Amino acid sequence: MPLYHYRAKDRQGRSIAATIEADDIRTAAKILREKGYFISELKEPGKGLQAEIKIPGLERGPGLKDVAIFSRQLATMLSAGLPIVQAIAILERQTENKAFQKLLKEIRTDVEGGSSFSDALTKHKVFSRLYVNLVRAGETSGTLDGVLDRLATFLEKDLELRGKIKSAMTYPVIVLVFALLVTYFLLTGIVPQFAQILTDLGSELPLLTRFLIAVSDILRSGTLYLIVVAVIVGFAYRAYYRTERGRRVIDRIKLRMPVFG
């Protein structure tokens, strides 16, 4: 049975920091509420926003994992009876991801200023339209904690699937890169030597051989140009994907691909 760390206050206002065993985090929160505790933090050891490995100077931006953890912890706090502004403020202090911390601060400020939680989320691209719309539905129906809990479960499964796909793709990608390097070496190092020998013999070369020699010449004389073209194509792809139409087109293509779809 998992062990959860928690911080809370009892009915007399005394601070408590301890651990509790429960089947899952929602059950743990329920047990603590039944004891009359006012929960300020509840998490599994080693889990949480601060569990990420930090490398100075290489801070990452907000990602899907941050949203999943945020959703789970916010759902737990709302279930425990915390006001949403206070819950967001607690999570804001806990996270060590500076970019996500800044994002939570902006959300908290908007909610304190009178915006709904869902409206505050729309300003940040890390929260998808589906996420925002479900949160809005939860606000309207008064089941925000349940919606956030289900969203957290969905995001966690999504992250797990992505991890499996990355693991499955690692070996094929390594093999592909190695094959490309070997091919490049053959075309730029070996083929030119054979081409010179065949030219000296003066015999007419087959079409396939002439094609390989032509590719070899292009790679040897135009490698820099190919790199420049690849960089330009990469920037063009990113710029196009940032547009609404580009995102729809590229996402539609991805969904039709076996791995991504």
Image (cartoon, rainbow, N blue to C red):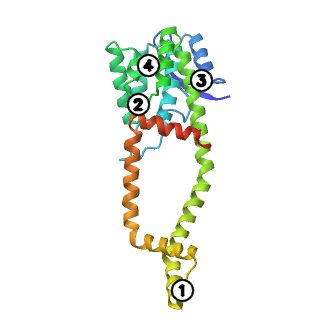
Q: Secondary structure at mark 2?
A: loop
Label 4 packing within 10 angstroms: few (<14), some (14-19), many (20+): many
The three-letter amino acid code for the residue at tag 4 is Ala
Q: Which residue is mark 2?
A: 125
Going 49% across and 78% down the picture, which residue do you hit?
189
Q: Percent x, y for residue 75?
A: 52, 19
For residue 87, the mark is 4
Residue beneath label 3, please? Answer: 25
* Spatial separation of the CA atoms under disc 4 and disc 2: 21 Å
Give the residue type that dot 3 points to.
Ile
Of mark 2 and mark 3, the one earlier in the sequence is 3
Left or right, residue 97 beside residue 161: left
Q: How far is the residue under mark 1 from the one under mark 2?
A: 59 Å
As measured in the structure, the alpha-carbon distance from the residue carrying label 3 to the one carrying label 4 is: 16 Å
* Disc on the earlier residue, 4 or 2: 4
Q: Position of residue 8 (x, y in %)?
A: 49, 18
Q: Marks 4 and 1, Cα distance to the nearest angstrom? A: 76 Å
CA distance for labels 2 and 3: 28 Å
Circle nearer the viewer, 2 or 3:
2
Q: Quadrant of residue 1?
A: top right
- Of marks 4 and 1, which one's residue comes earlier in the chain? 4
Comparing labels 4 and 1, the label whose residue is closer to the camera = 1
- Tell me which amino acid carries mark 1: Leu
Q: Amino acid at mark 2?
A: Lys
